[in-house]
Image (cartoon, grey):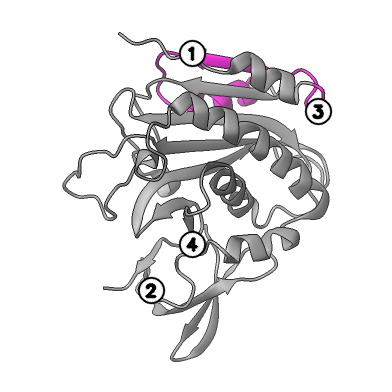
Amino acid sequence: MHIQQWPAEAIWEALAAELPGFTVEILPEIDSTNSELMRRARAGRTEPTLLVAEHQTAGRGRLGRDWRTARGDALTFSLGLPLAPRDWSGLSLVAGVAIAEALHPDLGLKWPNDLWWHDRKVGGILVETSGAGAAGAPRYVVIGAGINIATPAATEGLRTPPAGLRELSPGLRATDALGAVVPALARALRDFAADGFAPWQARFAARDVLRGRPVLLSDGRQGTAASVDAEGVLQLRTDAGWESVRSADVSIRPAA
C-alpha cells in the first residue's frame, strides 16, 4: 500500500509561532476528524490542532448529512483553535474563500459551504464550535473540510454530481493540497477574528456560483440569488421582494 508523505513538519513550522501549542496529527483512519476534535474540546482539550485522516468512516457534512469517499481519493482534515471574533457571521464563507484561493483560481463557492466546479461538488466545509462563555471570550472552533482529489464515481441519490481537483490540477496529491490549504486557512481565521467578514465579501462574490441564478430553497422558497451582504447573509430576490437567508435555516440549490 502506498504511504503518503504528509507535510506535517512544514505546516507546523509555518504556523507554530502564530499558534502557540499547535500540533499536527495524521491518522490512518477515524470516524470523523470534526467529531474527534469536538470530543476533545468537550473534555477540555482546546489547543490549536490540525487533525488529518487518510480515511474517515463516518464523515459528516452540514445539516447532518453523511460525507463518504473511497480510501485515498480525498483530503479530509479539521483545524481546531480558540477564536474570539467580534462577530461570528460569515465564518464558513471565509473558510471557503481561503481554501478555494489556495487550491485553484477556477474553484467556485456555493453558499454557504461548498466548493464547486462547473456545477459539480468538489468538497464541503463544516464549522462547529464548543463553549459559549461570556461575550467576547474565546470559543473553540473546528473547521472541517472534505475535498475530492480524485473524481468519485457518481452515486445514486447525490443531489449534486461530484468532481475532483485532479480535473483542474492533473497529478495533484492530497499532501500537496493540505500543504497549500492549512496555512492559508489558519491566517484567514486570524484575520476574520480581527476584522470580521466584510473584508472578504468581494472575494466571496468573485467565486459565488449562485449569484444571479434562479434558486430553490429546501423550505420551498424560490427566487434569484444575489450575493451576500457584509455579514455573509445570502440576499434572495423573490416575487414578494428581498429576503435574507441564513445558513442555519436551509439548504439551497440552483433551480432546474
Residue pushed farthest front?
Answer: 170
* Local SS, label 3: loop
Amino acid type of disc 3?
Answer: Glu
Q: Which residue is mark 3?
A: 18
Amino acid type of disc 2?
Answer: Val
- Spatial distance from mark 1 to mark 3, Cα to Cα? 24 Å
Query: In the rendered view, would you say 158 is above or below 70?
Result: below
Q: Residue at x 35, y 38 (%)?
A: 67
Q: Which residue is mark 4?
A: 249
Q: Which residue is mark 1?
A: 5
- Spatial distance from mark 1 to mark 2, Cα to Cα? 42 Å
**Chain-order first, disc 4 or disc 1:** 1
Rendered location of residue 201, percent (x, y): 67, 64
Q: Is residue 25 left or right of residue 147?
A: right
* Local SS, label 4: loop
- Spatial distance from mark 4 to mark 2, Cα to Cα? 15 Å
**Chain-order first, disc 4 or disc 2:** 2
Q: Residue at x 58, y 65 (%)?
A: 206
Q: Which residue is mark 2?
A: 215
